[in-house]
Image: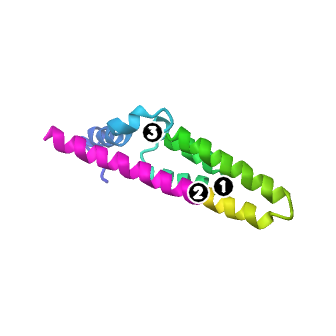
Amino acid sequence: MAFGRGSHVEITGLLAASQKAPAIARNSPYTRFFWFSGDSHHINCMIYLLAIFCSPLALLLTGKPISALFNLILYVLSIAFWITIILHSLGFLLWGIAVLHATLTINNAREERRARRIVAATKQN
């Protein structure tokens, strides 16, 4: 990008465009925090990585508190079964179910937001 006359206007226009969040994402207090970076691809990857290690927190950050509560119950049960050596494999199975539940719920929430944005954009036209 050449920095000449008028490049300041171009750069500030790019910064303003990157900091605008879609109207649906602004409604969630958890996702509003991340839109200042301008690169949502890393956030998409990080939320799925967080779903592997701490799935209830990932669901809370996605804006699904009821699913996060259900997932927390699965997560606590899996930790309790991991502590008991006899049912160690059941704990791993419950953890896998919790991660799968979190991943599918996050994906579903993102698809719902995308569909709402598309519907809102078609209604404006």
Query: Do we see residue 47 in this rendering?
Result: yes
Q: Which kind of residue does numbered mark 3 sit on? A: Phe
Q: Nearer the viewer, residue 112 or 93?
A: 93
User: Residue 67, image x and y in percent?
Assistant: 55, 44
Mark 2 to mark 3 CA distance (whole Å): 20 Å
Relative side of 18 to 90, left or right: left
User: Residue 79, image x and y in percent?
Assistant: 76, 53
Note whether 66 is above or below 102 in the view shown: above
Q: Quadrant of residue 99?
A: bottom right
User: Residue 53, image x and y in percent?
Assistant: 66, 55
**Residue found 27% across the figure and 42% down from its top:** 10
Residue that extends furthest to the left in the rendered view of this protein: 125
Q: Which residue is mark 2?
A: 49
Note whether 114 is above or below 9 in the view shown: below
For the record, the magenta segment spans 99-125
Mark 3 to mark 1 CA distance (whole Å): 25 Å
Q: Which kind of residue does numbered mark 1 sit on? A: Phe
Q: Quick check: marks 1 and 2 in contact, CB under 8 Å?
A: yes
Q: Which kind of residue does numbered mark 2 sit on? A: Leu
Q: Which residue is mark 1?
A: 53
Q: Nearer the viewer, residue 98 or 115?
A: 98
